[in-house]
Structure formats: structure tokens, C-alpha cells
Image: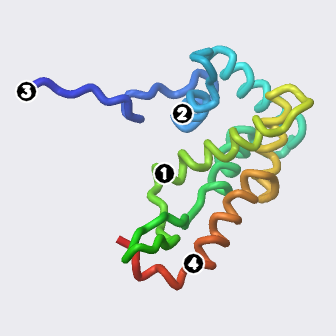
Amino acid sequence: MAKKFTASSEQLKPDPVYQSKLVSKFINCLMYDGKKSTAQKVFYDSMSLIEKKLKDVAPNEVFETAINNVKPMLEVRSKRVGGASYQVPMQVKPKRQQSLAFRWVIQAVRGKKGKPMSQRLAAEFVDAYNKTGAAVTTRENTHRMAEANKAFAHFAW
């Protein structure tokens, strides 16, 4: 039986600068219209801006810590029970934590206007590193919603 091809992290190559699969995955999520070289330029420019801004911390460490600070532990999911829909709090699996963190950071960056993308990305990473900023606010709102609906936790499937 032939092996089925899956585009998973095992086949993902580490990025050329930091040798990190996490960075490579983020660049792929940042990419727009298949323009990977543009996404790489934006990411690496933002890393150099972070390096200038925070001299005592390595930029890839800022990136990893920022992503970890944005990752949600809980989220709410809709569950229909007896004709009514309940917002049921559930734990988030690690793979989904990462994808939500990437999505929220990129949404926060794309939502801001006025500055070049690399500057906005660098600012969001620094904010997330310091546990502030739009992406961390989204995470806190998600946790707050899960906390408010914990009375429905017994509906979790």
C-alpha cells in the first residue's frame, strides 16, 4: 500500500536563519498569495528591529516567548443540547494552541495600519513578549469567556 503524502511538520524544513521549524511554520502562515520571499523578508526585518529594540534578549527567544504567551489554554465551543446551544469551555490541544496563537498575532498585525508590516510585527512580538498587545488581549478574552461559561463544562464531549 502506498504511503499517503501529508504536509505536516515532519516534512517542514527549518528556516535558514534560526534553524527553527516554529519560525518556518510562522513564515508559512504569514505568507500571502504564495509570496514566501516577501513573508521571509517581513519576518527577518521584524527580528532585526526586535534585536535593536531589546539588546539583552535574542530575537528568536522573544518570538518563541511571545507565541507561548499568546497560546490559549481554554476555549469555548458550541454544543447543542436539547434544542439549546451552550458555550462549553474545553482545553485546547497543543497543535491548535499554536495555530490560534499564529492566527491571532497575524490578525493583530494586519489590523493595524500606517506602518510597514515588519514594524507592526516587531511591535506585536515585543508586546506579546511583555504580555500586552492585541493578540494577548484576544487570548485573555477567550479565557474570560471560558471562565464565564464553566457552569456548562459538564456538557464537554
- Crowding near the residue tagged with mark 3, few <14, some 14–19, many ≥20 C-alpha atoms within 10 Å: few
Using the image, determine if residue 24 lies above or below residue 112: above
Question: Label 2: which residue?
Answer: 25
- Crowding near the residue tagged with mark 1, few <14, some 14–19, many ≥20 C-alpha atoms within 10 Å: few
Residue 52 disc label? none
- Crowding near the residue tagged with mark 4, few <14, some 14–19, many ≥20 C-alpha atoms within 10 Å: some
Helix, strand or loop for disc 2:
helix
Q: Position of residue 30 (x, y in %)?
A: 64, 30
Q: Position of residue 55 (x, y in %)?
A: 86, 41
Q: Nearer the viewer, mark 1 or mark 2?
A: 1
Residue 96 disc label? 1
Question: Label 4: which residue?
Answer: 149
Q: Please give left or right for residue 94 compared with residue 105 in the image.
A: left
The reply to whether dot 1 and dot 2 touch (C-beta < 8 Å) is no
Three-letter amino acid code at disc 1?
A: Arg
Q: Please give left or right for residue 109 compared with residue 88 in the image.
A: right
Give the mark nearest the N terminus, 3 or 4. 3
Q: Residue at x 49, y 73 (%)?
A: 86
Give the mark nearest the N terminus, 1 or 2. 2
Distance from disc 1 to disc 4, alpha carbons, whole Å, reads: 20 Å
Q: Nearer the viewer, mark 3 or mark 4?
A: 4
Question: Label 3: which residue?
Answer: 1
Q: Residue furthest bottom?
A: 151
**Quadrant where the N terminus lies?**
top left
Distance from disc 2 to disc 4, alpha carbons, whole Å, reads: 33 Å
Give the mark nearest the N terminus, 1 or 3. 3
The reply to whether dot 2 and dot 4 touch (C-beta < 8 Å) is no
